[in-house]
Image (spheres, grey):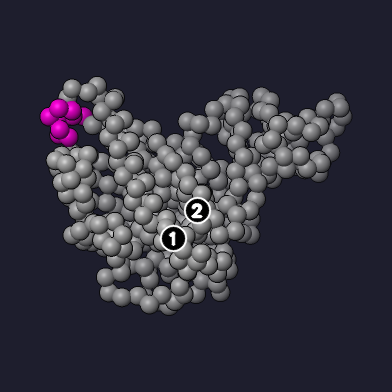
Amino acid sequence: MGQKATLPIPNSWYTVGFSNELRPGAIWTRTLAERELVIFRTRSGQPCAMDAYCPHLGAHMGIGGQVDGETIRCPFHAFRFDTEGVCVATNYGTKPPPTARARVWPLREVNGIVFVYYDSRDLAPSWEPPALDCENWTTPIFEIFDIHDHPQETVENGVDIGHFAVVHGYSSVDLRKDLTIDGPRFRVSYSARRPMPYLGALGAAVDFDFELDIYGLGFSLVTVTVPKYHIKTRLFILARPTVRERIDLALALSLKRIDDPATVHPLARLLPRKALNSVIARTIHQSLIHDAKQDFVIWQNKRYVHPPALAEGDGPIGKYRVWARQFYHEQAALAVEEA
């Protein structure tokens, strides 16, 4: 496998799950940057991300622990911790020890996604994940993959124009708008053509536009528009570093609900509107997964090349790498030639 270790873990917001699965009383266990966390939702609906190991005597609160009202209860001695990490009760009726305090991580819940912030120096976040207008959009459907890769390389794939034709069979790839950089946000827009056998005639090539919005190195949003069929989707590419050189990559899709089924196909009117939206969303989601899996083989066996020997036609890879420096404190490991 290729070597990813030259890149430290970036400081960024990372996805730990999706809101519709974190019901009141639920507890998840997640690994972020080689640290075990529990993500839970209190009975009133408050989400919380906390170190998994109880500060009392070290039990894992995600294994046998329970949500008790507005607290999480340790399975070992039933000490209870609130969403600030404070031990509010022991099981003995005695005063909680002042040092029994669990670390709580910054958490945000936006767009139906649950984010947790990581910083290698434990600094507070200086920016927020974007809140989108989700009215008239379907609930994201998703699939998660455990792969050998690094968030910076996964995100870089979106600005690597050269591989679109070679790996994915896209044609007529053109830059629609110049890239823009605004702090933690990197934005670029393309148009292209690709086979879409489930839309229109079997095997027909379809023209589409896609806008790539990157927020940090854990959240990429690709807004895809197929003008011919009036279809618009949001593809969420969400990488979370787990253990050394591995990530959990969530690939999620939300569809803008279709008002006129006939714009997709005359026979589409025969389907109930909800069923039509579900079929189209799942079809396009499977197309996203298909394309991503074409990249997986390359990602998991490539080496991080520094500095890259870039050529005209590669896309804004050099500018992307310069932009990505801001998400590391370990600047020496990330020095790249200006491009």
User: Which one is earlier in the sequence, the residue at label 1 or at label 2?
Assistant: 2
Please name the residue shown 18% across and 28% down the image: 268
Please name the residue shown 72% across and 39% down the image: 60
Quadrant of residue 27 in the image?
top right
User: Label 1 sits on what residue type?
Assistant: Trp
**Going by the image, does 85 lie left or right of 288?**
right
Region of the chain picked out in magenta, as a range: 259-268
**Going by the image, does 256 lie left or right of 206?**
right
- Of helix, strand and loop, which one carries label 2? strand
User: Label 2 sits on what residue type?
Assistant: Ile
Please name the residue shown 29% across and 56% down the image: 168
The image's mark for residue 191 is none
Quadrant of residue 203 in the image?
top left
Write down the residue under mark 1: 299
Q: How many numbered discs?
A: 2
The image's mark for residue 147 is 2
Q: Is residue 292 visible?
A: yes
